Image (cartoon, rainbow, N blue to C red):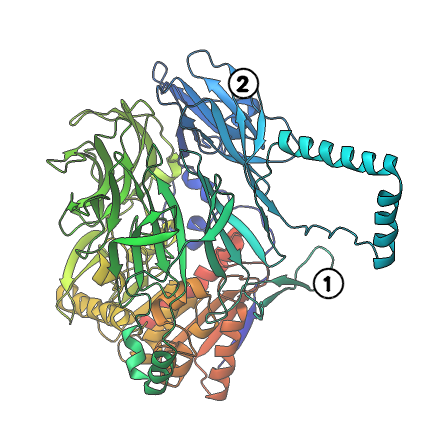
Amino acid sequence: MKRIIFCLFLASPLALFAQDLGSLSVEKIMRDPKWMGVSPSNIKWDENSKNIYFNWNPEKEQEDPMYQISLDIRKPQKVSEEITENLDKGTIIYTRDRTKVLFERKGDLFIKTISTGEEQALTNTLEREANPVFDKNESKVLFQRGDNLFSISISGGKLVQLSNFTRSKKRPESQLSKQDQWLRQDQINEFEIIKKREADRKEQEAKNKANEPKDPKEFYLDERSFLNGLRLSPDEKFIAFRIVKRAEGNKNTIVPNYISTTGYTEDISGRTKVGNALPGYESYLYDIQRDTIYAISTKEIPGIKDLPDYVKEYPKQLEERTKKNEDRKVSINGPFWNSDGSLAVVTVSALDNKDRWIMKLDPQSGKLSPLDRQRDEAWIGGPGIGGFFGGSNIGWIDNRTIYFQSEATGYSHIYTLNVNSGDKKLLTAGKYEVQTLQLSNDKKSFYFTANMEHPGITHFYRIPVTGRTFVKLTSMRGGNEVSLSPDEKWLAIRHSTSNKIWELYLQENKAGAKAEKITSSSSAEFDSYKWREPEVLSFKNRHGSDVYARVYKPESPAPSKPAVVFVHGAGYLQNVHYWWSQYFREYMFNNLLADLGYTVIDIDYTASSGYGRDHRTGIYRHMGGKDLSDNVDGVRLLIEKYGVNPKNVGIYGGSYGGFMALMGLFNEPDVFKSGAALRSVTDWAHYNHGYTANILNEPANDEIAYKRSSPIYFAEGLKGNLLMAHGMVDVNVHFQDIIRLSQRLIELKKENWELAVYPVEDHAFLEPSSWTDEYKRILKLFEKTLK
């Protein structure tokens, strides 16, 4: 029997439990997470490398206040609100001798002398000054105010406007009528005094014009355009900028908010849907000496006209696009100049995300020449590479050599490249990912984080820029998030294990040095329960690839020997690891299930992060393909190795995990007896562009990919019991998704499903009462159907 249940929980008092947690229950584990203890976060060093600041909340306050430790006093102390406000400095820029720092605070610019702590205010305006940098002589500061670039001298405070972007068109000078022009000229011709005054006026105008500084060339920005990437070359000869033109004709989605303070239903303006028109990107250079503006040319980019392979499955589209022979649309990031401004490179990304080029820029002409091309018939991504999933790491080691990351080997690794000769060198190699990258102050070494020892263990390393032997600097098993002190002598480490929350440690920047624990965050109540360390293992999927999983084993399996598959969200996310999971509620729920006799498996299925390019892109054009079969193969593992009953297997997950639960129940009904799909995508044609177009292209161009990837087309296959749960003000996966699927199930006359809706919840639930209600329903479903 189908039911729609409205669950409205705005606020309810938290249940009170003793310091001994006792046996787990949904009510206990779904409380406000502060009951567990609040880990330190937002780790930052001060400029002199003597103090570490971090947010922490051992007293369970409403907000997480700021704490500090010093190298001398390693006991956390709460800091004042004034110090907390003064720490909000954005990106800090050091002078070359590292004696001073430049930063923005509350929209104004400051220079601070590190040894004395003295601050010099460079600006004090109502407008915001942003993105400050030193010029190459460190005598001026360059910054952006509004749409324009300025410089200000550090000693005298002289302000100079370097660019002239405007949104107001100049009014044309009023023109005299033919009659008035005649009268004016006649006056000049008739009277000597008028003739003399007119000549004096023109002479004075010429003198004034000669003495006035020349204004930068004007560039008009219309209402559809906005400016970003404003950069001045170190030799102060060129200004680079990018114009982004908003797409026209797109229709934004609307998310109704039924529980509002006004008592009226209020509309939340949402995003567009995949396949809508994209913004246009145009990159330019302003040659200051020649006072001319010109576009950076993209027509020389190798492969600019290449079509993706999937178009071959659509002969008519292939014919049309081949005939048009159009350049693909791209976005240019940069330029990135070397220290003296003699060389510049840019990264160019195709908007279809099949290519990432690194190009050398000739600023005199705006032409590009190729240095490196990374093409992927699926999509460009991976740590440090760019694309939808993150930023790109690129920079200069010296005036000839750049560094960058690429997945050319199948895993994200570090490369160096001589811009003049084109010589390229691979510094790291192996079946692991370089996940963070930082160049040392002296530019002789790289610091990087990688999962070199195991996909689920991260460590911090140092390697010379020449690429010889690397040094492992951390030693604690699990997850290590490292903040390197500005003087590079110390490591502030956020460390956790699979059953211990994140804590702050301090360690000297030496291999083999001992890490000193600074914080103890977990509550006595949380520590009173023996949280499981899930068994981490790997198995071969049906395609012969290694897939990693975590298994929660019950001490006493229930007589029916049930099993549950938990599916993590996001698709591109790693959850099989030895550190504390961001899915901490699900981790605790999996412990509860194991206590009740279930065997639980959590799989890093195809598309998960941490395993390289092929694993990441294995779902290209078929979501619910290899990712689903990996979970089915994981069930086979549970049957063969752990003796679970194949007739009593459930599945649950949220977001992408909810999508997978639907695909499992619809396409593998003999494997999954019941399942819970939470905040799930039901039709990928209704999701956003940035995520979906990478994987499935656009609906109008690749209908095949969408038809085989969207659960709504497979709802006929439902046999088992399905619970769906969704927040009504979800601005990520819209409530419309689950309503459309519900109507489809009604029309198919399916009866073994129910929908629980949460009127005040967005994609990520906030209210403990909502979490509690949702997971009580999941537990009830499994207890009823699998036992």
Image height of 301 relative to 713, above or below: above
Residue 604 can be seen in this image: no
Q: Earlier in the sequence, mark 2 or mark 1?
A: 2
Say which of 280 and 234 sits in front.
Answer: 234
Say which of 501 and 456 sits in front.
Answer: 456
Quadrant assignment for the C terminus: bottom left
Residue 609 can be seen in this image: yes
Inspect the image, locate mark 1, and give the three-letter code of the amino acid beneath it: Tyr
| Residue behind mark 1 | 264
Other-residue count near label 1 (Cα within 10 Å), few / some / many at <14 / 14–19 / ≥20: few
Question: x%, y% of residue 598?
Answer: 27, 62
Other-residue count near label 2 (Cα within 10 Å), few / some / many at <14 / 14–19 / ≥20: few
Among the 4 quarters of the image, the one containing residue 452: top left
Question: x%, y% of residue 20?
Answer: 38, 39
Question: x%, y% of residue 69?
Answer: 39, 21
In the rendered structure, find residue 693 and report the number of the disc placed on it: none
Question: x%, y% of residue 467?
Answer: 14, 38
In the rendered structure, find residue 120 and report the number of the disc placed on it: 2
Is 201 left or right of 129, judged from the image as shown? Answer: right
Q: Are marks 2 and 1 in contact (CB under 8 Å)?
A: no
Say which of 619 and 272 sits in front.
Answer: 272
Label 1 secondary element? loop
Inspect the image, locate mark 2, and give the three-letter code of the amino acid beneath it: Gln
Image height of 583 relative to 149, above or below: below
Image height of 326 relative to 515, above or below: below
Q: Residue at x 75, y 50 (%)?
A: 173
Give the CA separation, mark 2 to mark 1: 51 Å
Task: Give the total number of marks visible in the rendering.
Answer: 2
